[in-house]
Amino acid sequence: MKTIGIIGGMGPLAAADLFKKIILKTDAKTDQDHIRILIDNNTNIPDRTACIKGMGPSPVDELIKSAKLLENAGADFIIVSCNTAHYFMPEVTPHIGIPFMSMIDETAKACKRMGTDCVGLLASEGTSASGIYCDALAHQYIDMVEPEPDDLHVVHEIIYDGIKAGNTSFDTTEFRRVLKNMQERGAKQFILGCTELPIAVEMFGIEGNFIDPTEILAIKAIEFAGAKVIG
């Protein structure tokens, strides 16, 4: 089987969530049936949203360091446990000689397979501003609904003030209101377009018809590595 390399640290819980989902989704009866996985939990990678908004340094140099480290350590392909970081990956991949699997593209393809024609995007301000999901979904002829401009901060807050801050008592009232508004505007399912959001949904007991890009990436990585997926 191929060895998976995960660029993590954006944030640490998101990398742990991706790792866990790969383990839980692998059809394995023994330790030896599982996939070898290398993780660089690189917390030196600058904030991706801050960079996109022109308020912080570029994460590219640190992403390249992680990608090269994983390749040199024996990874056969790279995946990244951060949606927003995918915006920068075209600047990273020329520096490595192994494939990169895109969470964004795989999620858009999965939406097409599901027969979805209109999805709501829940993401960081950086991911929304980058347009990476909008472009990927447009290639699959899928419409996308985002929070109203005045509500983008609500999603940002549950990510940064909730999960990244380790705030288990975060008030999700406004977040639930935003979900309802997006449903009324046509969203039939919601892409959890930040790797902290699947954690938030589970932690805070938020109900909805959610699409989890972390799980989609985990399944595709298992298949590409040459292992079997449960179910």
Image: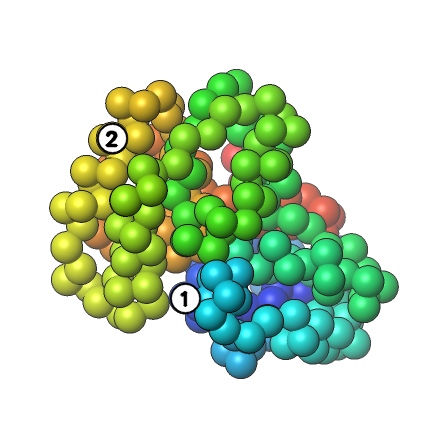
Closer to viewer: mark 1 or mark 2? 2
* Residue drawn where x is 61% and y is 64% of the image: 6
Gap in angstroms between the C-alphas marked 1 and 2: 29 Å
Q: Earlier in the sequence, mark 1 or mark 2?
A: 1
Q: Is residue 59 left or right of residue 43?
A: right
Neighbour tally class for label 2: few under 14, some 14-19, many 20 plus, Cα within 10 Å: some
Position in image of residue 189 (x %, y %): 39, 29
Q: Is residue 187 left or right of residue 64?
A: left
* Residue drawn where x is 37% and y is 50% of the image: 198
Task: Please tell me the numbered disc located at residue 178.
Answer: none
Q: Quadrant of the N terminus?
A: bottom right
Residue type marked 2 = Asn
Task: Please tell me the numbered disc located at residue 13.
Answer: 1
Q: Is residue 205 visible?
A: no
- Would you name the residue on which mark 2 appears? 181
* Residue drawn where x is 39% and y is 36% of the image: 146
Q: Is residue 135 visible?
A: yes
Per the image, label 2 sits on a secondary structure element best described as helix
Residue type marked 1 = Leu
Image quarter of residue 12:
bottom left
Of residue 136 and residue 204, the one placed in the foreground of this image is 136
* Residue drawn where x is 35% and y is 21% of the image: 186
Q: List the single residue furthest toward the front.
A: 54
Q: List the single residue furthest toward the bottom.
A: 44
Position in image of residue 56 (x %, y %): 50, 73
Number of numbered tags placed on the structure image: 2
